[in-house]
Image (spheres, rainbow, N blue to C red):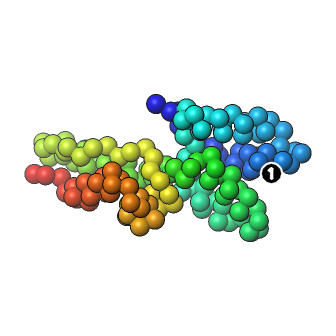
């Protein structure tokens, strides 16, 4: 099982400087090398979150946004964290089922998915899962379970 490594935006900026060869990149040069190796060997997953997308959108310089996005894309491979609301919805359904003395058999949500839509909880086949059959099956299963069975 690969390690899940969350990188805060200020560290993404440092990794971006290292990728671009800036002289002030310091220890980020070694960190970038190690993360590249860990991601390539599947020892680690470095996901992006909805917060990253929102913070990046506030960077005024299009060049800086693009440089950062290229670094994040390389290391994350566009893996995105599942939003906390998805986990809260799952926990709410389980709790409600418990209180109603019934069962809830829905599977727990995956910790990660792919693409910006996943980071924002938009589980649609367009822009998220594309033609990945397993992902489309998960999407259908998620939508089929809209209510707790009584």
Quarter of image, res 99:
top left
On the image, which quarter does residue 42 sit in? top right
Q: Residue visible at 41% across and 61% down?
A: 130
Question: Residue 137: x, y in percent?
Answer: 28, 54
Around disc 1, counting alpha carbons within 10 Å, would you say few (fewer than 14), some (14 to 19), or many (20 or more)? some
For residue 113, side relative to residue 42 (left or right): left
- Tell me if I can see residue 120 in this picture: no
Residue at x-position 37% and y-position 64%: 124
- Image coordinates of residue 26 in percent, x first then y, are 84, 38
Q: Horizontal and vertical percent for residue 47? A: 55, 46
Front residue of 12/148: it is 12
Please, what secondary structure does the residue beneath circle 1 have?
A: helix
At 73% across and 45% down in the image, what residue appears?
Answer: 15
Q: Is residue 50 above or below residue 33?
A: below
Q: Position of residue 80 (x, y in %)?
A: 51, 51
The residue singled out by tag 1 in the image is: 20
């Amino acid at each position: 099982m690969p390690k899940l490594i969350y990188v805060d935006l200020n560290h993404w900026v440092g990794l971006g400087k290292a990728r671009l060869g800036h002289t002030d990149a310091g220890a980020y040069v070694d960190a970038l090398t190690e993360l590249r190796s860990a991601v390539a060997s599947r020892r680690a997953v470095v996901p992006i979150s909805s917060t990253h997308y929102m913070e990046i959108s506030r960077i005024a310089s299009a060049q800086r946004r693009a440089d950062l996005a290229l670094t994040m894309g390389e290391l994350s491979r566009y893996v995105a964290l599942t939003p906390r609301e998805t986990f809260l919805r799952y926990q709410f359904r389980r709790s409600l089922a418990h209180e109603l003395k019934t069962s809830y058999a829905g599977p727990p949500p995956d910790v990660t998915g792919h693409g910006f839509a996943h980071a924002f909880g938009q589980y649609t086949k367009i822009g998220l899962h594309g033609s990945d059959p397993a992902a489309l099956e998960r999407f259908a299963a998620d939508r089929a379970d809209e209510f707790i069975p009584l």
